Amino acid sequence: MSISLTTQDTATIAVRSLSKDFGRIKALADVSLVIGKGELFGLLGPNGAGKTTLISILSTILPPSRGEALVCGWNVATQQEAVRRSIGVVFQDPSLDTELTGEENLDFHGRLYGLDTLTRRNRVNEVLALVDLEERRHDLVNTYSGGMRRRLEIARGLMHQPQVLFLDEPTLGLDPQTRRRIWNYIRSLKDSFGMTIILTTHYMEEADQLCSRIAIIDSGVIVGLGSPDELKSTLGGDVLELAVTRPTEEFVQSLRSHPSVRSVLLQNGSLMLTVDDGESFLPRTFDLAHDMGIRISGVSVRKPNLEDVFIKMTGREIRDEGIKEPRERMRIYRWGMRK
């Protein structure tokens, strides 16, 4: 099977009918996707939805069960070394050698990819400057803060000048200030180098701020695809959140049957309604609750955000654990590329 692209010159990643099974668990089911050159593309989904599995296949860590994927024109199943030379990966789990200095970690990575001494020295200087770690280059990594380690991991992923960079939860566990600093580095990679970046994240604001397009994955299937604004526009109208004490099925069904209501979801003891005009519909909601003996203890009206889209498309909040994806851990030395 081959993948036919109408935009071959601008497409960096092409996935067609890609599936991955772990026994009876279908981690990915018939996924098709095209990601353009220079695009900052986001993957959203609850744990176990298939995000890490998709990145693992695209980065040649896992083989697909069925279907085909091309990265920079190379087949991930049959041309693995070529794919690996074209990509950089920042893993969700820490993979730096904390007993080496920042510079030594980068130099070691360059050696694995067969970079000569002069090229390694130049690249170490360039990537350390990019992530503002020049003054800490000779310090052991075990003295680095969490944010500094993530910046060093991004620098390491850039050592061999990849065309594609995979960032798997790059700001997980970082404080808000450090997270936004990492955002700036990610933007600079896209704007300065035209690099294609695939980002997985649990932070809705992060995806909204950084990504030109987003795919929402649930149970191994892409259930939503588009720009942040396009995805939010699928809900339309306003989001009305009601803190309700013991809502009855009759009350919920009465809300759903109203022509102004597009959707109703019960989430953590609150009702989330998507309505055409929240302020106009609010009195109707209170009248209906009063007639049915339902107590509304709190209310808010706002425009839809990505989390609203996510909950509607997957039926759960992104922090839900779900089924953990089977993962294959890989040490950095397995990425060694010798010329």
Image (spheres, helix red, strand yellow):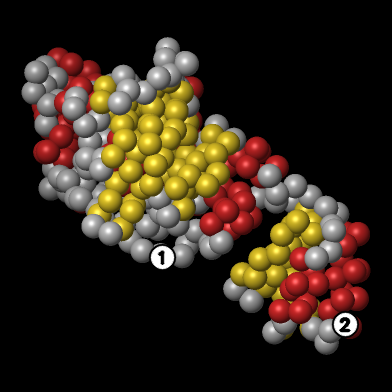
Tag of residue 32: none
- Indicate whether 243 appears above or below 140: below
Q: Which residue is mark 1?
A: 321
**Hey, which residue is sitting farthest front in the picture?**
1
Instruction: Left or right? Give the position of 316 relative to 198.
Output: right
Amino acid carrying label 1: it is Glu
Q: Is residue 240 above or below residue 32?
A: below
Residue 140: percent from the left, percent from the top? 18, 45
Q: Quadrant of residue 163?
A: top left
Q: Is residue 206 left or right of residue 153?
A: right
Pointer 2: what residue? 290
Which element is circle 1 on? loop
Residue type indicated by callout 2: His
Image position of 302 (left or right of 49): right
> Could you tell me how far apart the alpha carbons at marks 1 and 2 are, in whole angstroms?
36 Å
How many other residues sit within 10 Å of disc 1, few (<14), some (14-19) or many (≥20)?
few
Residue 225, given in percent of the width and then of the height, sits at: 55, 39
Front one among 66 and 311:
66
The numbered mark, 1 or 2, whose residue comes first in the sequence reads 2
Residue at x 31%, y 35% (from the top left corner)? 67
Please name the residue shown 65% across and 37% down the image.
Answer: 230
Q: Specify the farthest residue to the bottom.
A: 293
Asked if residue 275 is positioned above or below residue 229 in the image, the reply reads below
Which residue ends up furthest to the top in the rendered image?
9
**Which residue is rendered at x = 28% and y = 39% of the image?**
66
Quadrant (top left, top right, bottom left, bottom right) of the C terminus: top left
**Occupied quadrant, residue 219:** bottom left
